[in-house]
Image: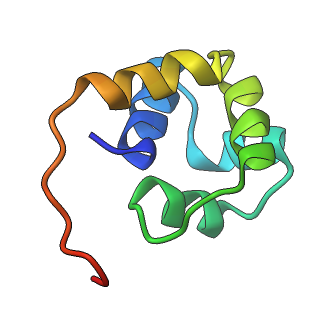
Amino acid sequence: MSIGSELRKARQRANLTQEQVSHLAECDRSYLSCIERDEQSPTADFLFRLCDSLNVRLSTLIAAVERSPHPLVAMGA
C-alpha cells in the first residue's frame, strides 16, 4: 500500500467525498485525487492537514503503509 491508497481508505471509512475532504483541508479536489492515485507527493504539513480532516493520526496512516508489502522500485525510475 501507499500513502495515497491509505488516505483513500481513511476517507472512505469516514464516509467523506474528495470534495468534502478538500474543503476541510483547504485544497483543490483534483490535488487530493492526484495524491490518492500516487501522482503527487504531499508535504508533511499537508499530510497533517489531511489527517486532521479525516480524524486519523498521521502515525497510524504511516504504520499501515509500513505494514504492507511494497514492490521494489528501480533506482532512478
Percent of width and height locating residue 12? 44, 28
The image quadrant of residue 56 is top right
Residue drawn at (68%, 28%) of the image: 51
Q: Looking at the figure, which quarter contains the C terminus? A: bottom left
- Name the foreground residue: 72 vs 46: 72
Q: Residue furthest front?
A: 75
- 74 left or right of 32? left
Is 52 above or below relative to 44?
above
Marks counted in the figure total 0
- Name the foreground residue: 27 vs 38: 38
Q: Look at the image and name its color scheme.
A: rainbow
- 3 left or right of 1? right
Q: Looking at the figure, which quarter contains the N terminus? A: top left
Residue drawn at (82%, 38%) of the image: 24
The image quadrant of residue 55 is top right
Is 72 above or below relative to 16?
below
Is 66 above or below relative to 21?
above
Percent of width and height locating residue 36? 45, 53
The image quadrant of residue 43 is bottom right
Percent of width and height locating residue 72? 14, 58
Is 57 above or below relative to 20?
above
Percent of width and height locating residue 15? 51, 23
Residue drawn at (49%, 37%) of the image: 7
Q: Residue furthest right?
A: 26
Residue drawn at (79%, 37%) of the image: 49
